[in-house]
Image (tube, rainbow, N blue to C red):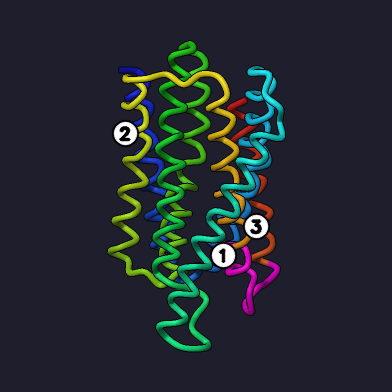
Amino acid sequence: MTPLLFSFATFFSTTFGGMLALWLREKLRYVMGFTAGVLIALVAFDLLPEIFHQAQSTNLDPIIPMVALLAGYLGFYTVEKLALIHHGAQNGEGAATTHPTVGVLSALALTGHSFLDGVGIGLGFQVSAATGIAVAIAVIGHDMSDGLNTVTLMLVNRNTSRRALALLAMDAIAPVLGTLSTFLFSVQGVALPLYLGFFAGFLLYIGASDILPAAHGKQSSVGTVALTALGAMFAFAVTRLAA
């Protein structure tokens, strides 16, 4: 039951982050700047080190999870661009570069990541209580940003607040479901670094190619740049404290 209790803490952390994004929607570009910094830094300071650690421990060539990372990045890029091409064909030349479908796809990608965060908590406790607690602290710390990211992606792609809240609820419950799923299985060998690589690609695309350009568009400012750096520092601090 201990891993399940920790996963419920992630539910409240995610929900708080999402509600924060809704409260600050009039200053969404600042939220996006912070969010982009967090996502990119999580890939650099959390996912990539873990990928290389897992590859080493399983004697896996590190290039293989890097191929998975590229597949995740290009896979989301392809899905997003096909959705925009379809939207542009329906609405004519000059259609907006944002679209509700893109927001939903982005939020679902983060929800999938949150589900696997819950899996990580459960598998951590399968190793030992100390490992499980360390993983849970890291997940709780950055799941507030996951909730913020989910709502931000929905709003910036012109979804309604109701839709944003619905995706936030999915993202919040996902770690709990992920933890519950580990009562039924265990993951060993090369599967873990491959998963980490694939979702690192997803997050890298969302942060660097989606949120960051939107935050630093025509209204970019010193404040937005500072918040992007602050988001990166926040992610660094969370990952180091949980190390």
Q: Quadrant of residue 107?
A: bottom left
Where residue 39 appears, x then y in whole percent? 58, 49
In the picture provided, is 177 more to the left or to the right than 109? left
Q: Looking at the rendered structure, which numbered label has been put on residue 30?
A: 1
Please indicate whether residue 14 sits to the left or right of residue 66 in the image.
left
Q: Residue at x 49, y 75 (%)?
A: 85
Where does the image place residue 45, in percent across and percent down from the top left?
67, 37
Q: Earlier in the sequence, mark 1 or mark 2?
A: 1
Which disc number belongs to residue 228?
A: 3
Residue 214 lies in the magenta stretch: yes
Tag of residue 108? none
Q: Relative to 10, does residue 103 appear above or below in the rendering?
A: below
- Indicate yes or no whether the magenta region holds residue 179: no
Q: Is residue 192 left or right of residue 45?
A: left
Q: Residues within 10 Å of mark 1 (few under 14, many from 20)?
A: many
**Which kind of residue does numbered mark 2 sit on?**
Leu
State the quadrant of the C terminus.
top right
Asked which secondary structure carries label 3, the reply is: helix
Residue 111 higher or lower than 56, as above or below: below
The crowd level at tag 2 (other Cα within 10 Å; few <14, some 14-19, many 20+) is some
Residue highlighted by disc 2:
177
Give me the residue at 38% from left, 35% from top: 175
Coordinates of residue 141 in the picture (x, y in percent): 50, 37
If the image is split into quadrants, where does the N terminus sit? Answer: top left
Residue at image coords 70%, 68%: 222
Indicate the amino acid at tag 3: Thr
Q: Which residues are magenta?
A: 210-222
